[in-house]
Image (tube, grey):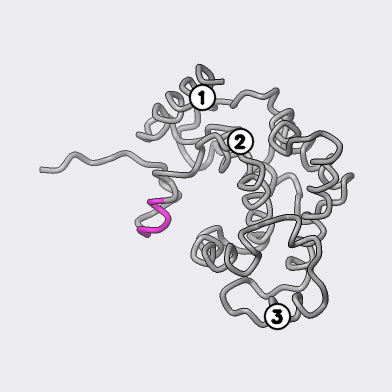
Amino acid sequence: MTKKINRCTWCGEDPLYVKYHDEEWGVPVHDDKQLFAKLCLDGAQAGLSWITILRKSENYWKAFDNFDPYKIAKYDDKKIAELLNNPGIVRNKLKVNAFIQNAKAYIKIKEEIGSFDNYLWQFVDYKPINNNHENLKQLPATSLQSDAMSKDLKKRGFKFVGSTICYAFMQAVGMVNDHFVDCFRYKEILKLQKAKKSNS
């Protein structure tokens, strides 16, 4: 008899969603380009479910030049029209334009601060927040930290970065460990955090 693995209930049984939960969600990310990509993709989720974006994730990476902000910032009307005809992504003009605007804002942060990673992680004081939630009802949609991040990102020209999107982003990139305490990944994420700390 196989032992049942306890997981957060939100990922259901979809293999793609389970893989994302088991391997990516909550793992601390410190790579500038990965953080930029994840922030854009969380913005693309607005009004949709995350699984919709997850299923289109590979298409997004191809369509947006592997999320190279310096290339995206130079997209012209021809490229925008091409993207809006691409069935592999969410064909929403506001969201496509947001990626371009976000790329320009990202470049400014890189020029000013030198690291998108340092800029974003300052909102959690450069260390992950470990919560102790037991079920979906306890999971917050926003936090004081996501409010602050959202406010500052908007001030810097980013689009689709409301507090709810910022909180989902923080959960995804490991700024917040919101795995349920009985989920097998909760303790694994704690170990990853410690390993990261000892290597830094």
Mark 1, residues whose alpha carbon is within 10 Å: few (<14), some, or many (≥20)? few
Provide residue 199's location: percent of width, then percent of height. 51, 20
Q: CA distance from mark 3 to mark 1?
A: 40 Å
SS at mark 1 in the image? helix
Give the amino acid type for the residue marked by disc 3 in the picture.
Glu
Q: Is residue 95 above or below residue 184?
A: below
Give the amino acid type for the residue marked by disc 2 in the picture.
His
Residue highlighted by disc 3 = 82
Residue highlighted by disc 1 = 196
Mark 3, residues whose alpha carbon is within 10 Å: few (<14), some, or many (≥20)? few
Residue highlighted by disc 2 = 30
Q: Is residue 126 magenta?
A: no
Q: CA distance from mark 2 to mark 1?
A: 10 Å
Which image quarter holds the N terminus?
top left
Q: CA distance from mark 2 to mark 3?
A: 31 Å
Task: Work out whether residue 97 or residue 49 is closer to the camera in this orientation and state it.
Answer: 97
For marks 2 and 1 on the same chain, the one whose residue lies earlier in the sequence: 2
164 to the left or right of 7: right
User: Marks 2 and 1: CB-CB under 8 Å?
Assistant: yes
The residue range painted magenta reads 14-19
Residue at 45%, 33% in the rendered image = 134
Residue at 64%, 64% in the rendered image = 65
Residue at 56%, 61% in the rendered image = 49
For marks 2 and 3 on the same chain, the one whose residue lies earlier in the sequence: 2
